[in-house]
Image (cartoon, helix red, strand yellow):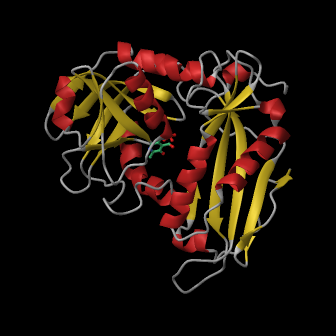
Amino acid sequence: MKNIDWSQLGFHYTETDYIVRCEYHNGSWGEPVATHDKTIQLHLSSTCLQYGQEAFEGLKALRGVDGKVRIFRMRENARRMARSAEGLYMAPVPEDLFCRCILLALEKNMDYVPPMGTGATLYFRPLLIGITPRLGVGPGHDFLFAVIPSPIGPYYKGGFNHTTPFIVNRYVDRAAPLGTGQFKVGGNYAASFRATEAAHAQGMSCLFLDSVERRYIDECGAANFFGIKDGVYVTPKSTSILPSITNNSLMQLARDHDIRVEQRPVLVEELADMTECGACGTATVISPISRVIDPDHKRIYEFGDTPGPISTMLYYALLDIQYGKEEDKYEWCTVI
Ligand SMILES: Cc1ncc(COP(=O)(O)O)c(C=O)c1O
């Protein structure tokens, strides 16, 4: 194992020995290769730079109680990346090839999987870009797929006990209802920076609303929203949000614990009837929300500075599966 102070790692890029890359030319994918070189030579007219043909993913490998390494729901990331590719008219990476690349990236960087109990994990950032040089507007026909690994620490230093305040933004739309919000593509994030940076400047994160009526909750920064209302797990249904693999897993665990799940449009005002709520995604699993400020409507929804009981139960239920402490009955983990 590498000599890294794992417990001091933040959510930052740390270089590992290898990345994995694979190219698509003349209608087919080549073989994946692991290289020390983390850079590429790219034509300045490439479709990724000119027209934003770019998609990415994020998933983690963790060392469990039995010393084995587990990758969480890798095939779901593969499927989502294929949908993102199709959404931007790129060649999808076949599911098996995606998984082979992740497994090769893990095998070549096994020394970077942090020990259990440090809060750190090995994160993989799969990336797909269009590399055909083009000046006329249109999609390319050559693509590069790469898997960039990096050991990471908790997103917030306090981990799950760190609660986050959010502020509602009605002045920036992250994505259009039938646009690219459901895909994990760079443009969505660039489009959100004006709002997220304005929120950060006030010490908060940004709560995005639907971009038609601006009455319904869409996403919490780069995470899905869920709240507990009358004991029910409520989470937005919207065509402009990313289908979160974490949220999907939490919904299943909630049902397994006899908690009803409603996936439906969620009005901002419903926050008043929620006892706890959180942002969920790969980075934090659950980041409990302390309060939501709605400046336009002069309202503050308070949830307290400690995680609520249902969030806590769901958080540990998911972590216990990821660390191999509990039975993985849905076979979410690839065990190595
Ligand atoms: C915009 C957005 N929503 C939600 C999520 C959470 O998705 P997941 O649980 O698959 O990480 C992410 C992170 O990938 C994201 O970037």
Residue 39 seen in this snapshot: no
| Extreme residue toward the bottom, this view | 136
**Image location of residue 210, percent across then percent down:** 26, 50
Q: Count of labels shown? A: 0
Residue 212 percent location from the top left of the image:
21, 57
Residue drawn at point x = 61 percent, y = 77 percent: 140
Which image quarter holds the C terminus?
A: top right
Name the quarter where the N terminus is drawn.
Answer: top right
329 over 125 or under it: above or below:
above
Vertical relation: 2 (above or below) 138: above
Which residue: 53% across, 67% down?
52
Residue at 24% x, 32% y is 293
Residue 272 falls in image quadrant: top left
> Which one is in front, 308 or 42?
308
Residue 169 image point, x, y percent: 27, 45
Residue at horizontal 51%, vertical 83%? 137
Which residue is more in the foreground, 208 or 178?
178
Q: Position of residue 105 (x, y in %)?
A: 78, 44
Q: Nearer the viewer, residue 256 or 188?
A: 256
Q: Nearer the viewer, residue 138 or 49?
A: 138
Q: In the figure, residue 252 lies in which quadrant? A: top left
Can residue 194 be seen here? The reply is yes
Single out the residue that lies furthest toward the front. Answer: 329
